[in-house]
Image: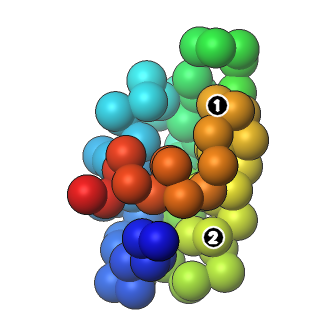
Amino acid sequence: MPKLPRDLSGAELIQVLKKFGYSATRQSGSHIRLTCLKPKEHHITIPLHDPLRIGTLASILADVAQAHSLSREMLLGMLFE
């Protein structure tokens, strides 16, 4: 089972999520809102922290996995391997 990266920044996560069709739609301070239109419209907010706290990262990835009907393990494999 792939582990969550411990030293990932918000900017790096945004780059990785582009693989799933996410793009920045707005920014408020140090937080960027990403939107993906497929399979259905989904919005997620990423803090531009370096590094992201592990709980924050886990929550974001769980939300992305649910929106794309994937297990967390499948999503981690697709993003970080």
Q: How far from the left and from the top, in percent, is residue 29? A: 56, 58
Residue topped by disc 1? 68
Which residue is nearer to you in this view: 76 or 17?
76
Q: What is the three-letter code of the residue carrying label 2?
A: Ala
Per the model, the C-alpha gap separating discs 2 and 1 is 15 Å
Q: What is the three-letter code of the residue carrying label 1?
A: His
Q: What secondary structure is found at the residue carrying circle 1?
A: loop
Residue topped by disc 2? 58
Q: What secondary structure is found at the residue carrying circle 2?
A: helix
Q: Is residue 81 above or below residue 64?
A: below
Q: Is residue 15 left or right of residue 57?
A: left
Q: Is residue 76 left or right of residue 64?
A: left
Q: Is residue 59 above or below residue 20?
A: below
Q: How far from the left and from the top, in percent, is residue 80? A: 31, 59
Q: How far from the left and from the top, in percent, is residue 43? A: 69, 33
Residue drawn where x is 37% and y is 46% of the image: 78
Mark closer to the chain start, 2 or 1? 2
Q: Is residue 4 left or right of residue 73?
A: left
Q: Is residue 23 visible?
A: no
Which residue is nearer to you in this view: 8 or 5?
5
Residue drawn where x is 71% and y is 14% of the image: 40
